[in-house]
Structures are given as C-alpha cells and as structure tokens.
Image: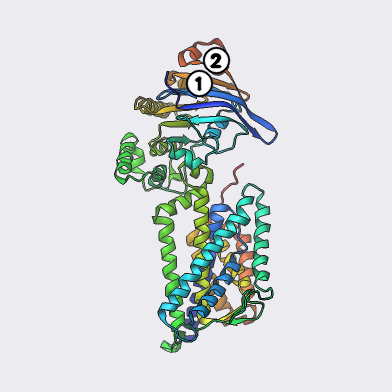
Amino acid sequence: MTEFLQHLVNGLSVGTIYALIALGYTMVYGVLKLINFAHGDVYMVGAFSGLYLARGLGVDQSPSLFKALLVFFGSIVVCAALGVIIERFAYRPLRHQPRLTALITAIGVSFLLEYGFQLPPVTQGSVPFPPGPTPRFFPEPFPRVDYAPFGVHVSNYDMVSLAVAVGLMFLLQFIVYRTKFGTAMRAVSFDSSVAGLMGINVNRVISWTFALGSGLAAAAALLVAGSRPTINPLMGLMPGIKAFVAAVFGGIGNVPGAMVGGLVLGLAEEYVAGYALSSYRDGIAFAMLILVLLLRPAGLFGRVRAEKV
Amino acid sequence: MSEPILSIKDLQVNYGAIEALRGVSLEVPEKQVVALIGANGAGKTTTLRAVSRMLRPVAGSVRFQGEEITRLAPHEIVARGLAHAPEGRGIFLNLTVQENLELGAFLRKDAAGIAEDMEKFYGLFPILKERRHQVSGTLSGGEQQMLAVARALMSRPRLLLLDEPSLGLAPQVVERIFQVLRDISAQGVALLLVEQNAHKALQIAHRGYVLETGEVVMQGTGKELLASPEVRKAYLGE
C-alpha cells in the first residue's frame, strides 16, 4: 500500500510537469497546426534563465522566498519573450508555406537552442553564457524538508511543485474558457481567417499563445529544478518528446486533453517502472504513442475532423 | 449624388495561374442594397473576400467611406465598420451561440450596448436565445445562418457583405432571413449581397451587378435586371 501511494505521489508530480509542457504543444498546435518541436528546448532555456537569475540575485548565499518568486516569474517572462521571438522570426515568415516547411524549421530552432547553449562561453561569471555542455546545479531557494506520512516520502518541494502546477492548470483553463482572449484563441484555432473577420488580430493571438505556452514550460522547468537540480542544454529533449506524447494522447489541440495526457503518462511511467520494468521507463511514452496512433489517432478527447480543401 | 460607401475599382485576384477576378469595378451607395449575381465560379465570393482582405488582390483598389482599405489587415477593416458574413457561414462550431455573438462584438467596448444588441437579435431569432449555451455545431443550417447574420451585425457595421445567405435553406427560412435583411437595410446599413437565388436578391436590391468569369457583364437597378431577358434566361431559369 505504501509503495502504491509512493508511486502515486511520484507519478502525479512528474505527470503535472508533463502536463504543463504538453499545454504549450497543444495550444500552439491549436492556433497554427504546427508541432513546435523547439518547445522542449524552451523548457531548457527556462531552467537556465532561472539559474542565471538565481545566481544574479545571490540565491545560493542568502536564499529567500521573495528571491525565489522573482526567479520563478522572471524565467517565465524570459521564456514567454523567447516563444514570441521564435514565432515571429522562425514561423511567421513561413505561415503560407507548406506545413512541412514550418515543421522542419521547428526542428532547426530546437537544434539551434540545444547546440547554441553548448558553444564556448562568450561572457565570464559564475555561470558563463553560453553555459556549455557541463551540467550545472540549481541552487535551493529554501531549505528542503522531507515528510513521511504513512511511510510515503514527500518533500516540501514536491508539494509546492504539485500545488503550483495544478494552480497554473486551473488558471490556464480559466483563461482559455472564460476570458475574451481565450474565446478569440479558440476562434483562431477553429478558423483563423474567419476570426480575422470578427476583428481579432490573429497575429497578436498567435503571439500571446506562444507567450503562454512558453511561460508554462519555464514554470515546469523551475518546478522540476526543485527536486532534480541538475540542468544541461540537452535536458529538454526527453521531457519535450514525452510531453508531445502526452498532448497527442489527450488529443492534440485540446487543452484539458493535454492535462489528462500528462497525468496519465506520469502515472503510467511510475507504475510500470515501479512494479515491472524499471529499465523501460523512457520507453513507456513511446509505447503509449504507438498505441494511441494505432487505436485512436485523434487522441482521447480529440475528434477526427475532415481536412477542408 | 453623395460618395458611395464602398467603391471597388479594377479589382484583380489570381489563384495561382488562374485569374479569378479580371478587373471588377462596382459601387455600393450609402444605405442601399446591392446584389452580386452570377454562376458558380464567376468570382462573387472572391470579390467579397478581396474586399474584407481574406485574400490579397493583385491589383485594383477598394475604398470604404472614402478611405483606401486595400492594404489593411482584416481586423482593421472590421474596425472601420465593414462586416463580412462569409461563404459557408463561418460559424465557430466549437464555440457556443453566445460566444459566437460575443466575438461579433470583439472590437466594441460598450458592454451595455453589446448586451442590448444581443437581446435584440435574440428577440429577432428566439431559437438562438433558446440555444445560446449550446455549442453551435449542434445548430441546424438555418439556425447557423441566422447566427451568422446576427454575429456580423454585432459589430454595428455600416456595410455588411453577405455571401449566399439562402444557400441550402428551406423556403420559409429563406423568407425569414430576407425579411431581416430588409429590416437591416431600412435601418440604414448598406448591404452587398452575393446570391445564387438571383430572383430573391434582385427583389430587395436597389442595384445589381452580374458577374461572369471574373468580369462585370451587366449592371442596373434591381428592377431592370429582373426584367432583362438575358438575366431571366441565364439566372432565373426562364
């Protein structure tokens, strides 16, 4: 029983992270019909901007809650801006080109970030920029406390992470379904040219969608850094692919679907790896992807929509 | 005569190598109904789309209330008081009836006026009020058309472009829609109406234009066109 609960806690904490990243994939797909393969790397940039901010503010010497919040929101802003810039300069010029062109460009942007961050340093400091391939350690903004109710190990970092992730998902759900911007976003996702006829500035909606998705990726990166503090320029690869699977599982383009997909993937990894095949942990996402594509290609909540010609 | 609210000059649109419009010129006078008739593929829908900038003309000019709008973005054109209810109705089927209407008023800031207009259209089309919280994908074709007209009017336009409002609808519903169009026109909104149903369209139109393979081949008052032997033969099935 204890073991079961422990897996549940671990599964939920990793699942909420997948869910936050998956939301970025699914929202961008919703408005642009583009899989933004650079999204996992935006998550990596989120972790590094957190590290730079934390070092700049001296979180390792004198940690405080205020600084932690500053690092958290600062990284979200940095990544939101990065997302907007990527869309503006890499994807927008290709808006009217075949979709494959934009997809390949997304892979290019992904490589640019992954390997750009491994170039020899240009600036010096406690962490140079670019940081290079060496793994770095994320400072702890507040002391770690471990609890063990019913023998289940949970740290205060896990609890904060879970609470913040769930809070962000509710916030996003509110934005998408209860605000004027959210309605505009759903309209653009259904038919962007008709959305323009409503007076919606479609480019602005797309920019804000990238900002939201990338901001959530940064939040996810910082929540992870609390419990797994090693970061490196390739850290976005695996979470990026897994979150993509989560988004496809939930039905790409569907916001609640991405959340459920993330949680299901997190729990599935935890239980399968915990009880049966621990060395296959990273394979579970791919098994899930294959099964979804075979059995229900539109995903859990997706509906098959005939391509309009 | 005062300046027309919309004037289109030598508008040319290409789809790849195909010339869809080869220099269309037409005018919509203030507060009048202008019908654009012609066979499938004559360029009627393309004309509307080029005016609202759903697509980019290769040449020509579009002036709205005296202002050149040919290079503006679609949302900037809406802001100037030109609404377009597109071909196929363009309802956001993933949104509720009410959300669709709210989007029609996207650029307006007067919450009270928006609520008032919404009640007005709910009064006009009670079925929409009944279904306002339903996803609009569940509406029938006629209900969707009512929603499309109401939504376009939610922006309080001075000119409304309407693409085939009668397409695929039962005669009573068509009657209802055209009654509403007459009322809108009586309230001073100018209409540019694209219709396959040439008879109905010319009946309410002050002026009409006949398009053939991307060119205006005939124009006149609604009555003149209704009486013209060529129009009667080609478009009224006589």
Name the chain letter of the residue that bears numbered label 2. Answer: B
Label 2 element class? helix
Residues beneath discs 2 and 1 located on the same chain: yes
The answer, for residue B169, to whether it is visible in the render is no
Report crowding for label 1: few under 14, some 14 to 19, many 20 or more residues within 10 A (C-alpha): many
Image position, residue A133 (x, y; %):
67, 78
Residue at point 51%, 48% (across, down): A202
* Cα distance between the residues tagged 2 and 1: 9 Å
Determine which quarter of the picture holds residue A127.
bottom right
Marks 2 & 1, CB-CB < 8 Å contact? yes
Q: Quadrant of the C terminus of chain B?
A: top right
Label 1 element class? helix
Q: Amino acid at mark 1?
A: Ala
Image position, residue A205 (x, y; %):
49, 52
Image position of B171 with respect to B98: above or below: above
Query: To which residue does mark 2 refer?
Result: B231
Residue at point 50%, 42% (across, down): A194
B16 and A295: which is toward the camera: B16
Determine which quarter of the picture holds residue A280.
bottom right
Image position of A270 with respect to B111: above or below: below
Q: Amino acid at mark 2?
A: Val
Query: To which residue does mark 1 refer?
Result: B198
Q: How many marks?
A: 2
Q: Quadrant of the N terminus of chain B?
A: top left
